[in-house]
Image (cartoon, rainbow, N blue to C red):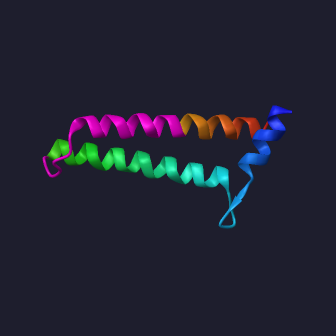
Amino acid sequence: MVIQIVSDIAFTQILGFPLVMWGGLTTAILFLSVFIIGVGLTTGKLNVPLKWHVRIAWLAMLFALVHAVIGVFLFI
């Protein structure tokens, strides 16, 4: 029953694409932004506080975990 609910939510269409795809895209964008901020901080080209780099990294990991759990539930 829980698997069916998660599957229904994951395949909910938003702008013609399933919600699980939007979650993956959001996760990829978050990880890309963490990478860009990290490189910018290392080279000195960005003046972003380190705490924002860490916060975005935690948010990206949370999104990745949720995205992975939903993906696993879809194949059970």
67 left or right, relative to 42:
right
Depicted 62 relative to depicted 45: above or below: above
User: Which of the 4 image quarters holds residue 3?
Assistant: top right
11 left or right, relative to 32:
right
Q: Which residue does the image show at 47% across and 35% down from the upper left? A: 61
| Residue extent of the magenta highlight | 44-63
Q: Which residue does the image show at 38% across and 37% down from the upper left? A: 57
Q: Which residue does the image show at 13% across and 47% down from the upper left? A: 44
Q: Residue furthest right?
A: 1
- Please state which of residues 28 and 48 is positioned toward the viewer in this rendering: 48
x and y percent of residue 49 in the render? 20, 40
61 left or right, relative to 14:
left
Q: Which residue does the image show at 35% across and 36% down from the upper left? A: 55
Depicted 15 relative to depicted 39: above or below: below
Q: Is residue 66 magenta?
A: no
Looking at the rendered image, the quarter that the N terminus falls into is: top right
